[in-house]
Image (tube, helix red, strand yellow):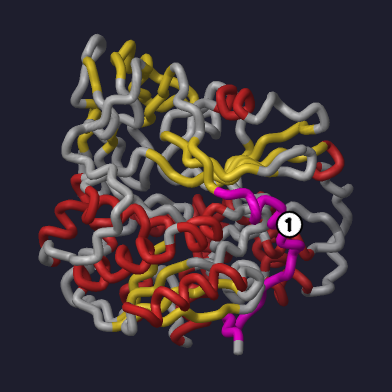
Amino acid sequence: MSKTFSIGGIHPNDSKISANAAIEDFPIMDMAYISVSQHLGAPAEPVVAKGDKVKTGQLVAKASGFISANIHSSVSGTVTSIEMLPDIAGNLVKHIVVKVEGDEWEESIDRSPQIEREITLGPKEIIERIARCGIVGLGGAAFPTHIKLSPPPGNKAEYLLINGAECEPYLTSDYRIMLEYPEQILIGTKIMMKALGVDHAFVGIEENKPEAIKAMKKIASAGYPQIKIVQLKKRYPQGGEKQLIDAILKRRVPSLGLPIETGVVVQNVGTALAVYEAVQKNKPLFEGIVTVTGKCMTEQRNFRLRVGANMNSVMFAIGGFPKDAVKLISGGPMMGKAVSRMEAASVKSTSAFLLLTEEETKRGEEGNCIRCAKCVDSCPMGLEPYLLNRLSRAGRVEDLEANMVHDCIECGSCMYSCPANIPLLDTIRLSKAQVLKIIRSRPKK
């Protein structure tokens, strides 16, 4: 029987039209534009300079704070500049620009296809290796993985949950790695279990991915009895951390709390694969699996894409920007972000590029709230989006905090379900940021 979370949720068309597209290597680009802000927290500090020669997998920027992550070159060649360039949202961010010259990898990286099953490193060494290789969460937020695997004093992990739900429409990169690298994912899971000191892990996969469930169960039953594969209902946002914990363990993360407060650490299947590659193959995180999809495309793709590939090179690789496409989204249609500049480049957490037509991007004309409460029914956090929208437009910050606007996970379920086409998420997102800023500025008790 499929499990699911207890509050809210919606059922958009999953549109997994790229599910049958096997992973293929993206052509090596001519130039790489490597951002030093590819993770939650402080930007990394460059350790190379203009004119330096770099190899694929070489450290080019070092973590600069407690919450930060190392950055490695995704290509080999010459550093031509370190400059401020636009990211996907259009914000100017420091980038290390490399002119590609061949593809010479760091000698310490094991590039053999052999699966390494024996975990020889201890917990501390595992976390150090993950930190050194710059591994971050690949489920969206790009939180440095070594921090997540080091619970703060007073918190102990009991379970590790691996998110294979991939509930966002169109995305199939996680699905493909579960089909093509199931054992590596499970070894990565076992490595993180050892780092955390936990005895049980669960991998949650939505029921609309039966082949992935079958592949993962087959490997788990053959050699990983402490890892259970859990079938989840097809329901958005099933892959949210709090929703996954609720669905599998029936535990609730407190307001403004973290999953570790419930004894749980959540990681993505892509992160588990990256951890395997870091610990068993000494491979830093400088490439990832990215879905390139859209109904306007003649061919759907899942690429192994190096970090630092700009949008123009991605479009060139698929034969050019489809004539019917008017918008490019980084991520899925629910939580993805519109690409503002084609000069912007991919980062570690890039999961998809979605091409949409004008018809698909049109918003309906905004009407008046009819008090239908569909937004309330759909909210997976039990909030009242219609009320938060009204309070936001009125600028009532104290009332927004009292009504828990900070608990919004920005999934877009409210806006998707609103028959009046009210841009609920737009106003709530802005208010949430304002309220969180106020909360964080208060003296800690």
| Residue type, label 1 | Ser
Secondary structure at badge 1 equals loop
Query: Is 5 contained in the magenta span?
Result: yes
Locate residue 259, reporting x and y percent.
37, 72
Residue 227 falls in which quadrant of the image?
Answer: bottom left
Residue 390 falls in which quadrant of the image?
Answer: bottom right
Q: Which residue is mark 1?
A: 15
Quarter holding the C terminus is: bottom left
Locate residue 371, reporting x and y percent.
83, 71
Residue at point 24% right, 56% down? 146
- Describe residue 240's horizontal placement relative to residue 441 as left or right: right
* Whether residue 175 can be seen here: yes
Most foreground residue, 270 or 435: 270
Residue at point 74% right, 64% down? 12
Residue at point 17% right, 39% down? 108
Q: Which residues are magenta?
A: 2-22
Residue at point 82% right, 46% down? 363
Above-or-below relation of 189 to 334: below
Residue 126 falls in which quadrant of the image?
Answer: bottom left
Above-or-below relation of 79 to 289: above
